[in-house]
Amino acid sequence: MRWGIEKRLEFIEFRLFWEGGINRADIVDQFGVSVPQASKDLTLYEEKAPGNLIYDKSAKRYKAADDFKPVFMQPNASTYLAHLREANGGTSGVTEAWLASAPEHDALPIPHRRVEADVLRDVLKAVREGHSIEVFYQSMSAKKPTPEWRRISPHALGNDGLRWHIRAFCHIDHKFKDFILSRCMKTREHGLSGASANDDKLWHDRFAVALAPNPALSANQRSIIAQDYEMTNGRTEVMVRKALLYYFLKRLRLDVADKLDNPHEVPVVVANRPAFDAALAEAMA
Amino acid sequence: MRWGIEKRLEFIEFRLFWEGGINRADIVDQFGVSVPQASKDLTLYEEKAPGNLIYDKSAKRYKAADDFKPVFMQPNASTYLAHLREANGGTSGVTEAWLASAPEHDALPIPHRRVEADVLRDVLKAVREGHSIEVFYQSMSAKKPTPEWRRISPHALGNDGLRWHIRAFCHIDHKFKDFILSRCMKTREHGLSGASANDDKLWHDRFAVALAPNPALSANQRSIIAQDYEMTNGRTEVMVRKALLYYFLKRLRLDVADKLDNPHEVPVVVANRPAFDAALAEAMA
DNA sequence: AGATATGGGTATAGTTTATGTACCCATCAT
DNA sequence: ATGATGGGTACATAAACTATACCCATATCT
């Protein structure tokens, strides 16, 4: 079967499962096929997935049968929710908008500067080809009030939950550091690499963070958190690159656990604190 | 032009722009077309976007010209980064994997329980049709150690940056509340709605949070933050639903600004604190 | 009740897109 | 020099798709 048809059948199934129904016009709008073709697609879908489709003459709409069994996709809540976030105008243009009757919804607005496509493109090229590159970078350091050109040898990208970083060897400070992608205004001059990606120990080393429910919570609450995090014996281990450890601490608010009055704020705490602190100190050195 | 072809041309362009080059085999692998068809696609692309394509005989690979000008997509860094997060195994199956030579990359692991597709599907149905529904819900309340059936009238979904919530009228407490989607184990029995979505004041009302750079930072640093957040006159306003205000506070760590020693931790602070606190108090009532 | 709009089905002829097969060319590694 | 690789093209054939036309059932409007 051709790729296009496969996609349309998948689309039909997606709509049936998540929105409960579909019309010919939906297929026409989504894929720009003719009306007769949309009819054929629906007939074909009925052939391939017998019994999933029921035409409701009164509603003039195909509906999903009660015993609907997907065959072209495995239903996945995160996929739907990703579509939803998309529909919200979030990450723009990753998926087509496959949702017609999306529920009212909203996500937390996270304000931030956007990344220049040309900058990212050039950084990717440097990573791919093992070059160094100069970036016009706005550092947060107090000594550097204005952006300046810095040569770096990038080898990876990291996401801290809010932003993307370039992981790179800094030709000025002679060590591996993070550069916030959105603070790179422009790029120029590819050159020789300053270091091998393998030498970035903090990037390659991972630390196993042990998480446990906050002991300040009641026994019930602790067991609920244990379920949320899919813990076994009240523990779960998360492998985190040492280079990302600091962001992990911040993102999960693991640093403020004991300072805040309300344990609700911090569902989990680090169970292997001494080792964690040591790893963090190593990463921040 | 047919939808399938359009997609392939878009794919060619995507690869050219972000990865610098493409081969016939890439098209064959991605779309399952024949080798001659892939040749035709490349020829067609050259026709539609003259000068973008250069065949490097030595590398045996089509490469993007230096003056590459996209015509089938507008290059967008967030789109690429979304693909990247995808490739990482994140949200699974939203986009096809359009990346061949992705750079080494990693995102912060955020542990959490996954949402049941059937639960979400049933909740969506209730929202669409304006029903109430019973959910087998694990509350965090100390009085409710085990999950129990609760009737709710859901009308929207909200994302707090880490998880999705159902925004719904609670038939037990007789008010609108958030229900964490992943804590709904199962659903049953659609019924009459308990309230109109319009009555959920906290959902519909938004508060304009004024953000300013943390005054504890140096002037330089403050101006950098101002750029990061695209502020004008050192301020930016973010409209946040009152129902999401609490999560906004937590996510941006606006609550710990003054308690922590290092201003680096908190780039921005709330500039209209009294109004903010009032709105928050209203939302938490 | 009759007219009309809507949503869907199907048949036909013709076009576009794609396949398989075959054979050709240039470059690179051996 | 030889073969492997990556790409181009030609031809006949098959599949997919379009446009057009006409038919049916249901709901809504007057």
Image (tube, coloured by chain):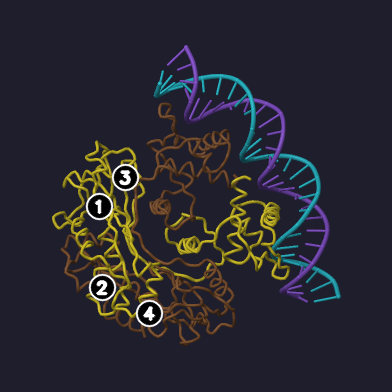
Chain colours: A yellow, B brown, C cyan, D purple
**Chain of the residue on which disc 4 is drawn:** A
- Which one is earlier in the sequence, the residue at label 2 or at label 3? 3
CA separation in Å, label 1 and label 2: 26 Å
Does dot 3 land on a helix, a strand or a loop?
helix
Q: Which chain hosts label 1?
A: A
- Chain assignment, label 3: A
Q: Which residue is mark 4?
A: A220
Amino acid type, residue under disc 4 in the picture: Asn
- Lower sequence index among marks 1 and 4: 1
Quarter where residue A58 is shown: bottom right
Residue beneath label 2, please?
A257
Q: Which residue is mark 1?
A: A178
Disc 4 crowd, CA 10 A, few/some/many (<14, 14-19, 20+): some
B161 and A148: which one is in front? B161
Kindly identify the amino acid type of the residue bearing the numbered disc 2. Ala
- Give the class, few, some or many, for how many residues have Cα within 10 Å of label 2's Cα (few <14, many ≥20): many
Query: Residue A214: which quarter of the image?
Result: bottom left
Residue in the foreground of this view, choosing between B285 and B235: B285
Q: Position of residue B25 (x, y in %)?
A: 50, 36
